Amino acid sequence: INLRFTGVGGKQIFTALNKKGVYISTVSACSSTKLTPSRVLLAAGQDAETANGAIRLSTSKFTTRKELDAVLEYLGEIVEDERKNNGN
C-alpha cells in the first residue's frame, strides 16, 4: 500500500512509526537501500517532492486486524502532530 499525506514527509512518518515498533519503507521494495525518490512513483508521473513524501506499507496473511487498526491510529496521530509542527 502506498500512501502520501499532504504537508508531512515520508521520512517523518517512517521515524515516528519506527519508534512505535511499526516498520515501513519510503521506497519500493526493490529500492529499499536507496535514498532517492521511488522510481515507480516517478514513472507514474509523480514529481520528486510527492514521491519523497510517500510511504509503503506491506501486509501478509499473518497481518492481523488489530495490527492494522493500530497502524491507522498511529498514522492519524503522527500526521496530525506533524501538520501542527509544520504549520499546515
Image (cartoon, helix red, strand yellow):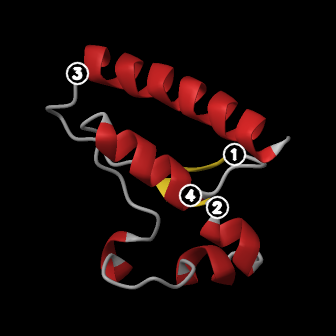
Identify the secondary structure beneath mark 2: loop
**Residue type, numbered disc 2:** Gly
**Precedes in sequence: disc 2 or disc 3:** 2
CA distance separating discs 2 and 3:
26 Å
Q: Are marks 4 and 1 in contact (CB under 8 Å)?
A: no
Q: Are marks 3 and 4 in contact (CB under 8 Å)?
A: no
CA distance separating discs 4 and 1:
8 Å
CA distance separating discs 2 and 4:
4 Å
Q: Are marks 2 and 4 in contact (CB under 8 Å)?
A: yes
Q: Quadrant of the C terminus?
A: top right
Q: Nearer the observer, disc 3 or disc 4?
A: 4
Identify the secondary structure beneath mark 1: loop
Q: Which residue is mark 1?
A: 5
Q: Residue 44: which quarter of the image?
A: bottom right
Residue depicted at 72% across the width and 40% down the height: 85
Q: Nearer the observer, disc 2 or disc 3?
A: 2
Q: Nearer the viewer, residue 42 or 20?
A: 20
**Precedes in sequence: disc 3 or disc 4:** 4
Q: Nearer the viewer, residue 18 or 32?
A: 18
> In x, y percent, where is residue 71?
40, 28
**Residue type, numbered disc 3:** Thr
Which circle marks residue 15 in the picture? Answer: none
Q: Are marks 2 and 1 in contact (CB under 8 Å)?
A: yes
CA distance separating discs 3 and 4:
24 Å
Q: Which residue is mark 2?
A: 53
Q: Which residue is mark 3?
A: 64
